[in-house]
Amino acid sequence: MIEPPSDPSWLPTPQVAVAQLASGILEYAQQTASGDAFRLPYPANLQLALDRLTLLAWHQDAPAPASVVELLQLAQEPFGDWKIDLTDADVDPDESLLIYGRPTATCEELGSFRGDVEGEIRENALLRAVMDKARAANAPRSYVAFRELLIRQPAIAAIELDARLADPDLALLANEVRQAYVEAPPEAMADGVIRTCGGCGGLRLPLDDDRTWMCEDQSCPASGTAGADHPASEGVWWLRRELCTFITAPGRAELRIADAIRKLGIPVALWPNFDACDISIFVDRPWVADIKAWRNPVRLARRLRERLFTVPPEAERAYVVVGQEQVKAHPRYVARLRQACPQVRPGRRIVAVSEAEFIGAVKRRVEAGA
Ligand SMILES: [Zn+2]
């Protein structure tokens, strides 16, 4: 990394300091979720982030957080309100790392050094086990069934999960499916029921006032909608957080796009060849696409500059498709992505487009009868 000449070599970059803070918060959240609440010491990444941000603050003559507790308070504030200048940290002013004491999607994107679905699938022990087992059994349908279950049902009643596992495709991966879920947390229970979200199928959790129930998935397409209430006594499972981020959130767009294209009468393969890409459509001269649900186009651009998916030689076209939630939330998302990642500009082998543009292009090919 080339640093501006005015900055001394000991000065950390805002990008690294913020990524370290995000990692520390994720570790801390994991610790507290696993029951060892608030045990000291704090994760090393939090302490290191404090050191680095303190150096940055001193260098900028800005107030520095005095302790990890203050650092965690700072993490609740939108970056635009920080007194420390975060230029080049790839964050937007309205983003923050924590909301209601829980890590945000931004935090997950910044703090997971791999940070993308494909990377996570290779690195995550559970997902690797799923992939290995499905491959060894030559059972691509089991792999697809596993992904679909996690996307469609981030929360599931215990009895329903048992029923789903009787499905022959899923039965192969029953152990792995069970490992993907944890028990719904105690705070999700009130009045004997566990509330789900109609928008994403996840859980709704209470805000501090204990009366407002919120879907905590920030990429939820309809977080205000109530879903089914399950009796708490019957048991409800909840998908592990990292799987929600890397499988469920991007997966919603994947399934929606697949459904829209199937309606046109076009065959669709999801995660073909055990995840070579997200979707392959048309049998002759196929089009392939990776579907991305990153909140921030600049962070996605950085990831794509590091690694793009491999386009099979027979593919006629290849796309990076940005989900409609992201395009809606971020003005000029696709333009900013192309600007920051020249490898996906029009004319290149892989082109970045919005979900609507992608489906429009498919429709045009269908109408042209090609
Ligand atoms: Zn939701």
Image (tube, rainbow, N blue to C red):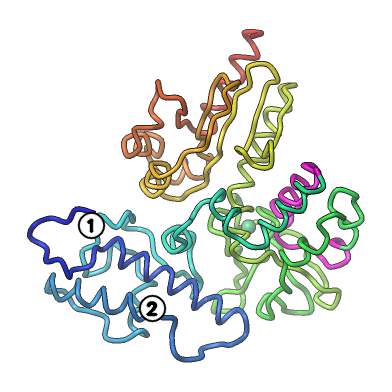
- Tell me which amino acid carries mark 2: Leu
| 10 Å crowding of disc 1: few (<14), some (14-19), many (20+) | few
Q: Is mark 2 within 8 Å of ligand 1?
A: no
Q: Position of residue 350 (x, y in %)?
A: 47, 28
**Which residue is under mark 2?**
46
Quadrant of the frame with the C terminus: top right
Where in the image, quadrant-wise, is ligand 1 located?
A: bottom right
Sequence-wise first label, 1 or 2: 2
The quadrant in which residue 55 appears is bottom left
Look at the picture and state if 339 lies above or below 234. Answer: above
Residue mark closest to the camera, 1 vs 2: 2
Q: Which mark is residue 96?
A: none
- Tell me which amino acid carries mark 1: Thr
**Residue at 56 percent of width and 48 percent of height:** 118
Q: Which mark is residue 87?
A: 1
The quadrant in which residue 209 appears is bottom right
Q: Main secondary structure of the magenta part?
A: helix
Query: Front-most of 194 and 16?
Result: 16
The stretch of residues the image draws in magenta is 138-161
Give left or right: position of 58 versus 191: left
Judged from this view, the residue extending furthest toward the front is: 136
Find the distance from the CA under tag 1 to the CA under tag 2: 21 Å
Dot 1: what SS? loop
Query: Front-most of 153 and 81?
Result: 153
Q: Position of residue 329 (x, y in %)?
A: 45, 46
